[in-house]
Image (tube, rainbow, N blue to C red):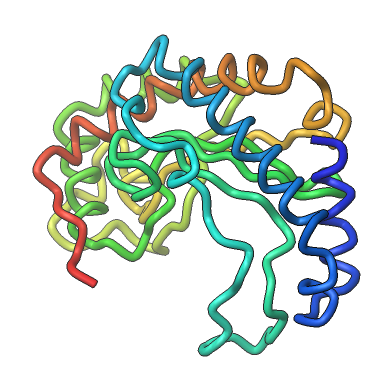
């Protein structure tokens, strides 16, 4: 992945369509390396979470092009390689394992629910936490030193007890993990194995969330 990191650094420095077109061969090599990494990670994760198997690894990745219609940043490309290895492929629900490669120490491994915009999903998770706060605490404590992060409201939402022992978690709109990865680790030969090992540590969070999210349907696009 060393060459892919180098390509992404150049893409960030020359984020325009002309340079992008001129470096087609370099881009193809970077994408091929990432596809290989994702395929390797998928197989390793499948050893402890078989639900992620059965998807074409190339369909688990996200495009470099950005949708700039509603953004002040009009840079046409996202200088990172991203993939979601989950039971429904790259769809965010059911939750799976997120991999982002970006130079400058900005790569990370992630797990959990990142999609705060799906109110039904958020509501299902809150009800699961409220119904079995002890199980939730066991998951959170077992993840240490990883910490569950997420967007949160200022107050406990309507319909939930503000005095609930897990009131702090009920304010959340998303519940996820992010583990930063240095460039040298991304470029190391054993990165896929190391990534799968970290993803296995994240699995208890995914298991809790996916039980809560049973029956959730992604909104029609």
Closer to the camera in the image, 69 or 146: 69
In which quarter of the view is residue 3 placed? Answer: top right
Residue 44 percent across, percent down from the top left: 51, 15
In the visual, does 4 lie left or right of 154? right
Residue sitting farthest toward the left: 215
Closer to the camera in the image, 90 or 218: 90
In the visual, does 161 lie left or right of 199? left
Q: In the rendered view, would you say 200 is above or below 38?
A: above
Residue sitting farthest toward the top: 47
x 35%, y 35%: residue: 55
Residue 145 percent across, percent down from the top left: 62, 21
In the visual, does 73 lie left or right of 91? right
In which quarter of the view is residue 13 placed? Answer: bottom right
Q: Quadrant of the N terminus?
A: top right
x 37%, y 59%: residue: 116
Residue 19 percent across, percent down from the top left: 85, 75
Residue 151 percent across, percent down from the top left: 46, 57
Q: Quadrant of the C terminus?
A: bottom left
x 80%, y 45%: residue: 4
Q: In the rendered view, would you say 189 is above or below 172?
A: above
x 18%, y 68%: residue: 220
In which quarter of the view is residue 180 placed? Answer: top right
Tag count in the figure? 0
């Amino acid at each position: 992945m060393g060459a892919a990191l180098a390509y992404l650094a150049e893409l960030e420095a020359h984020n325009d369509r002309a340079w992008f077109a001129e470096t087609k061969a370099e881009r193809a090599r970077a994408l091929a390396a990432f596809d290989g990494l994702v395929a390797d990670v998928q197989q390793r994760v499948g050893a402890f979470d078989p639900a992620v198997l059965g998807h074409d690894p190339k369909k688990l990745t996200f495009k470099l092009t950005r949708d700039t219609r509603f953004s002040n940043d009009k840079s046409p490309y996202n200088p990172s390689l991203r993939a979601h290895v989950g039971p429904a492929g790259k769809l965010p629900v059911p939750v799976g394992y997120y991999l982002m490669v970006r130079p400058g120490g900005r790569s990370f491994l992630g797990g959990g629910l990142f999609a705060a915009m799906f109110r039904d999903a958020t509501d299902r998770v809150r009800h699961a936490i409220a119904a079995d706060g002890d199980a939730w605490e066991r998951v959170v404590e077992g993840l240490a030193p990883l910490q569950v992060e997420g967007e949160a409201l200022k107050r406990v939402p309507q319909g939930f007890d503000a005095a609930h022992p897990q009131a702090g978690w009920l304010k959340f709109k998303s519940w996820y993990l992010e583990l930063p990865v240095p460039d040298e680790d991304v470029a190391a030969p054993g990165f896929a194995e190391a990534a799968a090992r970290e993803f296995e540590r994240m699995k208890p969070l995914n298991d809790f969330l996916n039980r809560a999210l049973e029956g959730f349907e992604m909104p029609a696009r």
